[in-house]
Image (cartoon, rainbow, N blue to C red):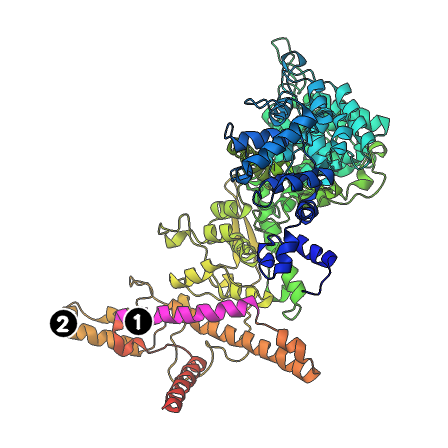
Amino acid sequence: MDRLCDEILQLVFYELNDPTPLTLVSKRFHNFSQDNFIRAHYFLARYGETQALFYALGRGRILNKSVLNTLLASGAHMSRYLVQLAIHHYFRSQGHFIKTTWVRSVPLPVFVYFMELATKKYGEIPVGKNEDDGSIFATFLRESRFHPSVRTTSWEAIKDILEKYKFLPFTNKDPIMAQFPLALAIEPRLLPLAVANGFQMDSKYRDFVFRKMFERPIASSDTRADDIVRNATELCRLDPTMFLSRTVAAEVCMEAKTNEAAYLALQRLDKAGELRFDLSTLVEELIKLFATTRSIALNSVALTLRQLYADFPSKDYIARHVLLCSIFIQEAFNCSHAPGYPYTANTPHLSTTENLKLRFDELGLGKGPARLELMAVLLNPFVERFTPVMEESDNLPERSGAVGLGLDPIGAKDFIQEVVEKMLEVACKGKMIKKMYERYDYVRETIAKVVLEKHQIDVDDLPPWDDEDACRRYHAKLSRDYTMLDSSTGRESLQLVQQMQPSLPPEIKPDDEVEGCEGHGMGNTQSEPELDETAPSRSRRRAFYMYNYANDSANKLPYPNDPLSVGRWVKTQFGTQSRITAVFLTHAIINDNAPDINYFFGYVDAHVPRPEARAVPLTFKHFQLLARLGRAPNWTLYNELERGAEFYYSEDDYLSDTVVIPLKQGSSLTYKIKKEASKTILTQHDPTSAPRGTKRPRREAAFTTRSYVVPDSDDEAIIGESDDEWMDDDLLMKNMQQQCQKKAETNLQKWIVHLTALCKDEERKYKGKKRSLDKAGKIEARARIQKNDFLRSLSVQLRHLRKVDHDRRLSLYGPEYADVVYSDEDDEEYIDKTTVRHQRRKISRD
């Protein structure tokens, strides 16, 4: 270090936040740090010309007259605003954003010399309260939205403090630094003056500035579209990096009804060619965003979308679908008069058909919707009333390219049946299905036929267990969780809309294929994030924005405000002992739809016990399906096992082979279900048929006699005893011990037996896959293989279920019979091996 030249040593000093420790190393370094030129250029190199003087005033021990002269001579920026705040802070005459000692560490002679230099440069300096340049600039920003007659700060005053007094925020800590670009939105002519003082426009402020420029004015403001166009054009001319982004333009479009001046200015800029994008394309993409968001049901949003569609007609069929949905949603709430027309006593009453026709003509939607368009509207998650749609379909004419319903009852029935069939797959359409079920008798038959013929799932219907990608992507069609962000709620209507291209009339046929609306984003409209929050923290402003953000997040959800799940309605309508309900439960378990699963099992509140009659039976087939897909069972399934759920292989064990659907007229609809033997994947051992020393009691409930014994109490043997024997406690205990020795299994033990066999089968597949990789020589791939979610979950839960069963037997029979496990030979072999392992470990330790 001692052999370094002064130039290199100078660079080392510039890289240190505090060179003081280095100056104490040697006398040479200390003498080097005393050079006034080195001290002045240290602040210039580290903080730049704009902030150098501010940080130098905060290091009063090393600041002297010579350092001040060197700083100013080297280009350090000294504005009158900096001098005013330094005087206020030094003499404690007014508080500002600076909370440290700052200039108070500067010796008084040095500070007096600093004021002399400022007086020579700027003359008399006002130091009164709120007379500094920063307060004047803040007042100018605050009054920018007021009427010119009530403004106290003129444009000329702001021009003087920038041109004559070199006004510029002197540190990034200054709150005015974040608000300074706002002045360019109000008066773009300030940009050259600010650049002359050292201001550099960062591109991150671009959207911030233009959003302020197109801000909605207050009622007393005289902001006109001409002023906005002039300011936007002037700012883009002065700075080539400034341009109106798609994000700001989309926000202005959504204020078409409330900020008419900004919307008109945006249209003029588009016609003049000042925008870097096509405004009509932006509006088309903006409308398509509302196809899968809840905000389409808001009246304000619907009026805005109609205004945008009327000003920028689109040939895109998804945009047309959004407009049709908004029309029918609003028509369901108000069928008396069309929006835009003031309702008075003289306004003629319009029927639904006339009202819809009037709206179609206003928006230029041609002759009205086609058959597939009406079906897509009914499938939209946010359309909950079908009356306006069906009235329109009754008047749908026959035309080329569209299959109309006309007044044909058979055609209307086919239309409703097709809608119901597709609506079963939209999980949040329970309300509309319920209304159709109550109005049309044939809907009941349609639901039963579709569910039983198309949506029953067996293990063989699932992808192969070794195809992990296919199993991960697989989703059952019914009972999906629409509250999940990755759910496909609303996609059914869009898929149907995309099939309409050959059915649309020529005047509304799209020119090109348009990509579907994926997610909630706008594509390239999200150019850069808004940086409004870079302004200083203010509690009132924060509370206002948090309130708006909460509303925005709720309005972007892909399901309606108060939805009714189709699965919940099915259980309520068809009951727990129904094959249709069983199919929906199977789909809910595969999709891990926790709300529907809890409802199927009768959980209204976690702390309130539910009657057993309200629960749909859980079957072993559900675990087999999850094992095939490698998915962890929902926690509710294990909770059902602990609660004593009865063991069934499949729904065929508790349902008959005949499905009876009652009709309103007193008749009934009967379906014959082909029953097949329950398939299991217990390839190693079948507990129900394997020979063993002591046979398990048969599981067939049909051959058991009616009894009033408490279920799962293992007290059937006590029934045959007389009443006198119950008076003897010793005899009672003896009977219980004999019953315990008969190896009568409870429902929980049956579940443990079969789930253990299933777990062993999955473990065998896992080990077989690892062995196959070993033979192939793929050592690295073998190391990356992990147990699937189902195997990990079942392994843990089986240990818990065994412990629960052990505790129950301990409390019922005592410690002598608590360790008896009523299982098959495989479980006994497993337990014996486990015991031997523990004994060997103990011996080895000794």
Q: Nearer the viewer, mark 1 or mark 2?
A: 1
Can residue 138 be seen at all in this image of the molecule?
Answer: yes
- Location of residue 284 by image quarter: top right
Could you tell me how far apart the alpha carbons at marks 1 and 2 are, in whole angstroms? 22 Å
Side of 27 relative to 358 (left or right): left
- Location of residue 282 by image quarter: top right
Q: Nearer the viewer, residue 205 or 654?
A: 205
Q: Nearer the viewer, residue 76 or 369?
A: 76
Q: Which mark is residue 809?
A: 1
Q: Which mark is residue 278?
A: none
Residue 770's place in the image compared with 554, above or below, is below
- Say which label, 1 or 2, has the lower sequence index: 2
The x, y position of residue 770, in whole percent, is 62, 79
Q: Nearer the viewer, residue 20 or 253?
A: 20
The x, y position of residue 611, in whole percent, is 36, 52
In magenta segment, residue 266:
no
Residue name at image x 67 percent, y 20 percent: 338
Callout 1 secondary element = helix
Side of 793 relative to 384 (left or right): left
Q: Which residue is mark 2?
A: 728
Magenta residues, start to end: 788-812
Q: Nearer the viewer, residue 250 or 97?
A: 97
Identity, as a three-letter code, of the amino acid under mark 1: Arg
Q: Circle 2: is it few (<14), some (14-19), or many (20+) Cα within 10 Å? A: few
Callout 2 secondary element = loop
Identity, as a three-letter code, of the amino acid under mark 2: Asp
